[in-house]
Image (spheres, rainbow, N blue to C red):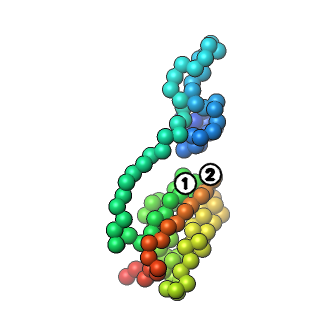
Amino acid sequence: FVSFRRVLGRLAVSRAFGDEEYKAVPDKNGGGDIGNPLVIADPEIRLERVTPEDDFLLMACDGLFDVFGSQEAVDFIYGRLSAMPPNEQDPMRAVQDIVHEAIHGRRSRDNVTALLVTFKRALAPRR
């Protein structure tokens, strides 16, 4: 059912809230649904403890992670923030930059949404 990372070749695998036609496998004889849903809206949830070493939390959809590795995205955001003066670090600008890079620079073909939560007032450049 999944080909080219899409359900039935059309619907991105991560999408699940709408699209009623993908919720159940139809009976080949037209007699109703016979199987489990093709997509579900059950989120994957993980509990993480924030520590003093954590600088920020980047949440993004698969459109960003189709073209960025996880560590690569962290390094991109860290680099953008730490390049700004300490009292002028702008998380909104950093997340706009990574979204722009994903769409225009790396040509993501999926929707790209990202949210950045910073835990510190300013980040120092890495050594």
What is the crowding at mark 2: few (fewer than 14 residues within 10 Å), some, or many (at least 20)?
some
| Res 107 visible | yes
| Residue 68: % across, % down | 51, 60
Give the image quarter of residue 101. bottom right
In the picture, the disc for residue 110 is: 2
In the picture, the disc for residue 8 is: none
| Residue 117: % across, % down | 50, 67
Residue underneath mark 1: 61
| Amino acid at dot 1 | Cys
Q: Is residue 37 above or below residue 122?
A: above
Residue at 56 percent across and 61 percent down: it is 114
What is the crowding at mark 1: few (fewer than 14 residues within 10 Å), some, or many (at least 20)?
some
- The quadrant of the image that shows the N terminus is top right
| Amino acid at dot 2 | Asp
Q: CA distance from mark 2 to mark 1?
A: 9 Å
- The quadrant of the image that shows the C terminus is bottom left
| Residue 99: % across, % down | 60, 64
Q: Is residue 87 above or below residue 76?
A: below
| Res 75 visible | no
Residue at 63 percent across and 66 percent down: it is 100
Residue at 54 percent across and 44 percent down: it is 14
Dot 1: element: loop
Q: Is residue 107 above or below residue 34?
A: below
Give the image quarter of residue 47. bottom left
| Residue 23: % across, % down | 58, 31
Going by the image, does 62 lie left or right of 54?
right
Dot 2: element: loop
**Mark 2 and 1 residues: CB-CB less than 8 Å, in contact?**
yes
Going by the image, does 14 lie left or right of 127?
right
First in sequence: mark 2 vs mark 1: 1
